[in-house]
Amino acid sequence: GYVPTSEETLQTLAALRLQSLNSDFSTHAPFPRLEELFPPHVLHARLPPPHHRPPPKCRGARLRAGLLAGGLWGHALAKQRAERDQRLRGRLREEGASTMAAILEKWKLLQGMGRPEAMAAYVALVREWPGFGSTLFDVDLRVSALGAVPQRLWLGIGAKAVSLYKPGEPEPLDSFCYGRISSFGASDSSTFRLSVEDRDLLFETSQVDEIAQLLNTYLTSAGTQRPPRPQEPAATTPPAPPGPPQGLCPTPVSRPHRPPVGSFHS
């Protein structure tokens, strides 16, 4: 799963996982793929953003650009794009190799640590995240109250609230407790709708069913703990029986005389 934290901590988590799976470092130990140990989005974030050329403003310029794109210039541009993509893939491989080397170095430092100890250290690091216990989903925010453009976010669903995170950031952009959620559901097979008070949020995701099922589970659980509604009278405990009037002692109750324990009598 995702853990929004620093790259250093992510590498340590990966090393602890290797220690718990394979024990001490060995060149003969099976190695999981890097994407199973380290979040791929962190590596992609290191790459330079793609350069977008603004379209020509003049109609004649657009026409000439279209004609050129269909001729020699079109082949040249396609070649440039292919070369750029190849450079980016090479850069990504370099970043991946560098990250794996750092993970292995941290793994070597864990020599002698047992599996239970490695698992305990892993959980202790993960618990440092304030949203520990939440399930994070990749979503694209399509509609918001602020009219924002589509934005890639993490939708975090926890036992007490639903939160929106910028990928990799430990603190949420916004959080909604379940009492503020009025409705939710699937608009279609790839769009999830979440209504929070007077706001409707639409998320594009491939995990619509998983999100709906998890939300329904938490909402059902939260519903059993909500206070009774106004039209439903709250259950009250019966009043305690009245005590003796203030300043008066209760009437003594006469009891038969019993000899003290250990005494002798005839």
Image (cartoon, rainbow, N blue to C red):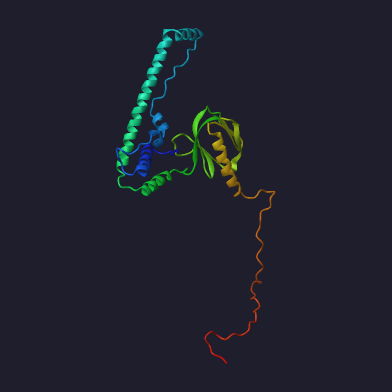
Residue at image point 52% right, 86% down: 262
* Residue 140 locus on image (x, y percent): 52, 30
* Residue 107 locus on image (x, y percent): 32, 41
Quadrant in the picture for residue 108: top left
- Outermost residue, right side: 231
Residue at image point 53% right, 34% down: 207
Q: Is residue 223 visible to the viewer in this orientation of the structure?
A: yes
Q: In the rendered image, which quarter contains the N terminus? A: top left
- Outermost residue, bottom side: 266
Residue 241 lies, with reference to residue 119, above or below; the image says: below
Q: Is residue 145 visible to the viewer in this orientation of the structure?
A: no
Q: Which residue is at the front of the view, 32 or 76?
A: 32
Quadrant in the picture for residue 19: top left
* Residue 82 locus on image (x, y percent): 40, 17
* Residue 24 locus on image (x, y percent): 31, 43
Q: Which residue is at the front of the view, 207 or 84?
A: 207
Is residue 140 rendered to the left or right of residue 41? right
Is residue 135 rendered to the left or right of residue 193? left
Residue at image point 32% right, 36% down: 102
Residue at image point 36% right, 22% down: 87
Residue 242 lies, with reference to residue 115, above or below; the image says: below
Q: Which residue is at the front of the view, 239 or 191?
A: 191
Q: In the rendered image, which quarter contains the C terminus? A: bottom right
